[in-house]
Structures are given as structure tokens and as C-alpha cells.
Image (cartoon, grey):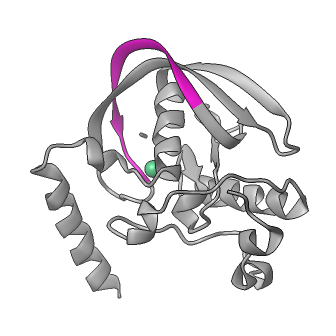
Amino acid sequence: MQVTDCTFSAFYTSTELIEPMAIRQILEFPDPRLRKIAAPVTVFDAKLEVLIDDLFETMYLAQGIGLAATQVNVHRRLLVLDVSENKDSPQAFINPSFEIIEEELVEHDEGCLSVPGFYETVARPSRVKVSAQDIHGKKFEIEAEGILSTCVQHEIDHLDGKLFVDYLSPLKRPRIRLKLEKEHKKSA
Ligand code: NI
């Protein structure tokens, strides 16, 4: 779009603890770490707030409208997004899930910070009810439609190791993969 139980020590690896930078590196397709299935967040503490701040900073800098923890190699179920025009409506969703309210599919040209430079049309349910927890662990629900519906579904996919390119034809996906692999070799 232009879109288990974890202990404290398992959540915050030593590199994350000593990492002073707020901007995190975004993994790019076809990095196999993007295929990991994220585990639920169970600890709601100051460290979680730091992680969420980092996700927002990383997302805004990259001019994305959504970012899942998976994309910065943290395999816990949380995502951030801001689909507002003025980039002034940050929303964080922890342990998110959704139910389809309206089966009708709507198409959006989706892009992804993990698949830079590619935009492809993907059809998804137009309205969903999203259940999640906030930064303090409090449960909430929202109804999402339009770009917000698409974005939330796209980001929850990341937590399940799925990418928008998985919805594309078997011809398109390998082409994107090849191009990005070439880019990665060039910059390596
Ligand atoms: Ni994405």
C-alpha cells in the first residue's frame, strides 16, 4: 500500500538490549526470517513501549503506513500503523486478530517495506472487526474498512509469516524475488 508464552529474556535478546538506535533494520523478501510465525506478547512493560516506539520511528522514516514486528526480526505478535493523510494517527495493535464482517472483496495496490519498489493489486475482505490489546495489555476492538482494513490484514499476515506477494500469480512472485535478490547482491 502507498501498506506461547514468552519470557522476558526470550523477548529481548541481548543484541536488542544493547542496541541504542531507534531505527531498526527492515528484513527484505525473500529473507527466510520473514516466514517465521510470531509468538504472542505476554509481557507489557517499558521494554515493549521502546519496541513500539522503534517500530513507529522505523515505519515513518521508511514512509510506510504499517509495520509488523516480524519485519524488524522480532517474532512477537505486534504491529503499528498510521493510515492517516497527515501521519498523525499512530495505532499499535498487540496480539491482533480479525473477523470478517463483510465478505465482499476490495482491491488495493499493495506495497510492503519488505518488498521495496513493488506494488501489486491484492483483493481482501472489505470490512473486518479487529481485536487486540493496547500497550498496557487492555483489550479493545475496532471495525476497519477501506485502507485500514487492508493494512491491518496485510500486517497480521506478516505475523503469520505471509507476504502480499503470496497472493500474486505463480509467474509474478519469482520475478519479484529475482529482482530483489539482484538488488541485494549489488548492495552486499
Ligand atoms: Ni508489509
**Residue 94 as seen in the image, left or right of residue 34:** right
Q: x, y (%) of residue 99?
A: 54, 22
Picture quadrant where residue 2 is located: top left
**Prevalent SS, magenta region:** strand
Residue 35, quarter of picture: bottom left
Q: Nearer the viewer, residue 183 or 79?
A: 79
Pick the quarter of the image with the N terminus.
Answer: top left
| Residue at 45%, 69% in the rendered image | 33
Residue at 61% in and 58% down: 69
For residue 107, side relative to residue 24 (left or right): left
Q: Is residue 7 above or below residue 161?
A: below
Q: Residue furthest bottom?
A: 188
The residue located at (30%, 33%) in the rendering is 122
Q: Which residues are magenta?
A: 98-112
Residue at the (84%, 64%) spot, across then down: 47
Residue 41 x/y as whole percent: 73, 53
Which corner quadrant of the image does residue 18 belong to?
Answer: bottom right
Q: Is residue 157 above or below residue 51?
A: above
**Magenta residue check for 7:** no
